[in-house]
Image (cartoon, helix red, strand yellow):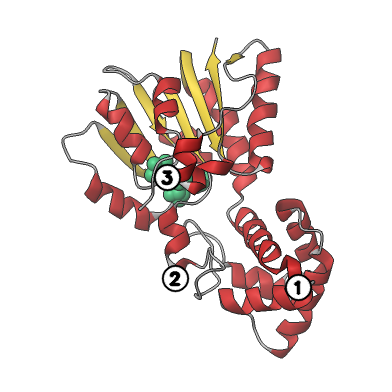
Amino acid sequence: MHIPVMSAEVVGALNPMPGKTIVDCTLGYGGHALALLESGANVIGIDQDNEILKKVKERIPSNKNITFFHGNFADINNIIKTPVDGFLFDLGVSSFQIDEAGRGFSIRFDGPLDMRMDQGVGKPASFYINNLTEEELAKIFFEYGQERFSKRIARRICAERLKKTISTTFELKEIIEKAIPTWKKRESATRIFQALRIFINSELNNLSQALSDSISLLKSGGRICVISYHSLEDRIAKNFFRKLKLDGILDVLTKKPMTAGEGEIVKNPRAKSAKMRIAEKI
Ligand SMILES: C[S@@+](CC[C@H](N)C(=O)[O-])C[C@H]1O[C@@H](n2cnc3c(N)ncnc32)[C@H](O)[C@@H]1O
């Protein structure tokens, strides 16, 4: 079950009410969308994962004011036709995606090494693991995973794939674990998986593109709320808001990012790394 993170804070930030239209760019299982719909707002819900869209369509009652879109939020310029009152980005993957072995996102489950949020687009992680050069792999692991053993891990992958094609999550996890000192195994495997996921799904580029396009689609007084789960995406939101504040386009409502309270973190450990930033169009 995916529990929405900082849901009360999202409602506080976007101030949903009848007559307002809010774009939930990361609809997922619709936890945040339901909270926004409860307050009477119209919601445009976007997700690039068709599997999750099927689930959320079954979850949200048909009498609610929501329009569903299968697509990438980097494409909001083509999806949104008239100015709206708010944008929500609750970044990353949902528990549904992580807990589904067949999607290949987690080191905890054995499955095909895929990691695409939209399985109809691009190539699975196994393609890149078996085809990129040692230098390219090391760069991805270092830039997106901040992994200090990036080079050693990339070297090991390239040696192992000469013996046998790497096609499952457990095969990759074992190779990573063999490449590094004993006490760092789990953390490194987690970071390498995160790095691959960010790379394969172009997560950072998509966020930059969507934030930049959201401005012209936002009404004056409309708000953007970004919840991020690692420093690379938080930095993009922070720098974007800062630049547009200097340009006199946005007011930044969070000097420092908001974080989840202790009570929420106990109930939902995923909330621990969440950072929320909010800005308002002048
Ligand atoms: C953390 S979950 C969102 C959970 C949701 N807020 C809820 O309450 O259930 C992130 C969702 O965003 C989707 N997603 C991530 N990047 C996306 C992108 N660039 N375009 C569209 N959807 C994206 C993922 O497929 C995933 O379902």
Element type at marker 2?
helix
Q: Residue at x 78, y 75 (%)?
A: 179
Q: Earlier in the sequence, mark 2 or mark 1?
A: 2
Secondary element under disc 3, as helix, strand or loop, is: helix
Q: Is residue 81 visible?
A: no
Residue 226 horizontal/vertical position (percent): 54, 32
Answer with mark 1 or mark 3, whichever residue precedes in sequence. 1
**Eyeballing the image, is 10 above or below 150?**
above
Q: Residue at horizontal 35%, vertical 47%?
A: 29
The dot on residue 182 is 1
Q: Is residue 221 visible?
A: yes
Q: Position of residue 11 (x, y in %)?
A: 39, 25
Measured in 3D between alpha carbons, the distance from the residue under mark 1 to the one under mark 3, in whole angstroms, is: 31 Å
Left or right: 52 as drawn, with respect to 25: left
Amino acid beneath label 3: Lys
User: Which of the numbered marks, if any, corresponds to residue 267?
Assistant: 3
In this picture, residue 81 sits left or right of residue 261: left
Residue 69 quadrant: top left
Residue 102 - label: 2
Q: Are marks 2 and 1 in contact (CB under 8 Å)?
A: no
Quadrant in which the C terminus is drawn: top right
